[in-house]
Image: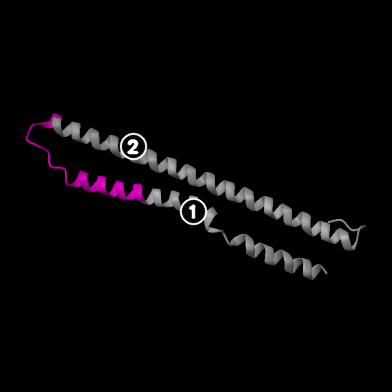
């Protein structure tokens, strides 16, 4: 009987590891957004490398440099926001798994109480 309960728990745990597509889509969207932002950062780096200052003077060069720095900071802020969203999704998923494990433990306890009411787990 205990072996059957352990086998049932193992089967239920294998079901927990399979994530339905509806639950993995938000995480994949965040990951795709991070990849897009990384690509934008690479393009910005390429723009910086290809920067050809005009002979107008150092002031124009400084203006272009400041604009590039502002764009890089804005891109970093977007990446950080995306990472925070991803962390929140992971925390939510962990919380759901813990609730599921608690439900499994309660179910096992109820099943054991059906066969032996004096035994509590």
Q: Residue furthest top?
A: 59
Q: Is the residue 24 above or below the residue 79 in the image?
A: below
Say which residue appears at 66% left-offset and 62% top-offset: 13
The secondary structure type at the circle numbered 1 is helix
Look at the image and say whether residue 58 sits in the magenta stretch.
yes
Most extreme residue toward the right is 118
| For residue 76, side relative to residue 67 (left or right) | right
The residue range painted magenta reads 36-59
Image coordinates of residue 83 in percent, x first then y, are 45, 45
Camera-side residue: 111 or 69? Answer: 111
Please tell me which of labels 2 and 1 falls first in the chain: 1
* Residue depicted at x 19% and y 31%: 63
Q: Indicate the quadrant where residue 73 lies.
A: top left
The x and y percentages for residue 60 are 14, 31
For mark 1, what is the residue? 25
According to the picture, the residue beneath numbered tag 2 turns out to be 74
Q: Residue furthest front?
A: 22
């Amino acid at each position: 009987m205990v072996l059957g309960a352990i086998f049932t728990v193992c089967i239920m745990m294998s079901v927990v590891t399979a994530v339905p597509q509806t639950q993995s889509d938000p995480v994949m969207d965040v990951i795709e957004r991070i990849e897009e932002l990384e690509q934008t950062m690479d393009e910005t780096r390429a723009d910086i490398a290809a920067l050809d200052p005009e002979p107008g003077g150092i002031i124009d060069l400084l203006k272009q440099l400041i604009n590039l720095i502002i764009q890089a900071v804005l891109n970093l802020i977007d990446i950080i926001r995306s990472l925070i969203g991803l962390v929140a999704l992971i925390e939510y998923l962990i919380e759901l798994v813990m609730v599921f494990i608690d439900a499994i433990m309660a179910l096992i306890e109820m099943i054991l109480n059906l066969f032996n009411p004096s035994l509590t787990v």
